[in-house]
Amino acid sequence: ERYRSLAMTIPVPWPDFNYAVTIPKSATVTLNAGRRCVINGSFSGEGTLNLSIPYVRTDVLADWSQYKGKLSVTGNQFRLCAGLNMENTALTLKDNVYMGHFRQGKGDALSATTKIGSLASSVATVTVGNGTYNVGYDNTNATFAGVLSGVTVNKYGTGTWTLTGQNSATLTIYGGKVLANASGGATTTSPVSVRAGGTLGGSGSVKAVTVYDGGTLEASASTISVGKFTVD
């Protein structure tokens, strides 16, 4: 009972956090990253992890494949330095966080693919860039209000993902539903593909949509606006 809340701080400079961390269900752990640190090791369990990144160059290489909890990231850059398997993780990005794939210890973009259970944010000041993101594996509903900047995003699972920001992501829907609900501009200015088992709906607009055999373009009281529509 007394270990349900725990805070850890990574010292500076350039330390290597390399531990196997298990967070039990109903427990909350806060991890405070130091300057230019590396987060290795592994995370597992179903509890909540609050990751605070107040400085630059926190490089994340840990194994998240067995972590089935909620990860909340605050602060600065959430630097993914490899394609990570977070398909069981419900990831929430807080105010001003930039998530992207980067080469370890450098500012160069890294071409990599990360799997995420669900991706959420309640603020428009969050940005996701650099690489490919496969989201939706935990089959839950989520809302993302940030910016998907020039990335490739693939939606899987049965949940509904609501996008309320203006993005430039190339989006493919393989499963579940994406609601394009941005106001004042296009939900994405890049192409959207709806594959078999996927649904696109919402009250906003997109520039170009291709619906493949088995895909669905949903009409509702507030119908989505499509610049160019193709059926394949």
Image (cartoon, rainbow, N blue to C red):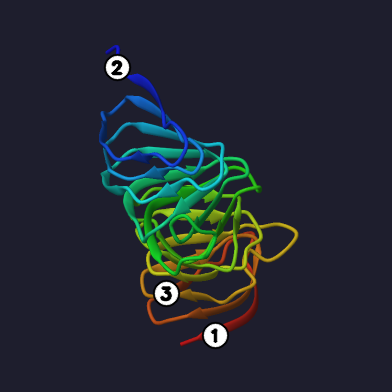
Q: Horizontally, is 49 left or right of 200 in the view?
A: left
**Residue drawn where x is 51% and y is 39% of the image:** 35
Q: CA distance from mark 1 to mark 2?
A: 55 Å
Q: Label 3, on which residue?
A: 215
Percent coordinates x, y for residue 74 in the rendering: 54, 38
Element under label 2? loop
Q: Which residue is mark 1?
A: 230
- For residue 116, above or below residue 224: above
Residue at mark 3 to residue at mark 2: CA–CA distance:
47 Å
Q: Quadrant of residue 107?
A: bottom right
Q: Residue furthest top?
A: 2
Q: Amino acid at mark 1?
A: Thr
How far is the residue under mark 1 from the one under mark 3?
12 Å
Q: What amino acid does circle 2 point to?
A: Tyr
- Mark 1 and mark 2 lie on one chain; the one further toward the N terminus is 2
The residue sitting at 38% across, 38% down in the picture is 70
Is residue 82 or residue 162 the one in the foreground? 82
Examine the image and state in which quarter residue 165 appears. bottom right
| Residue 93: percent from left, percent from top | 52, 44
Q: Where is the N terminus found, in terms of image quarters? A: top left
Residue 96, given in percent of the width and then of the height, sits at: 62, 44
> Label for residue 3?
2
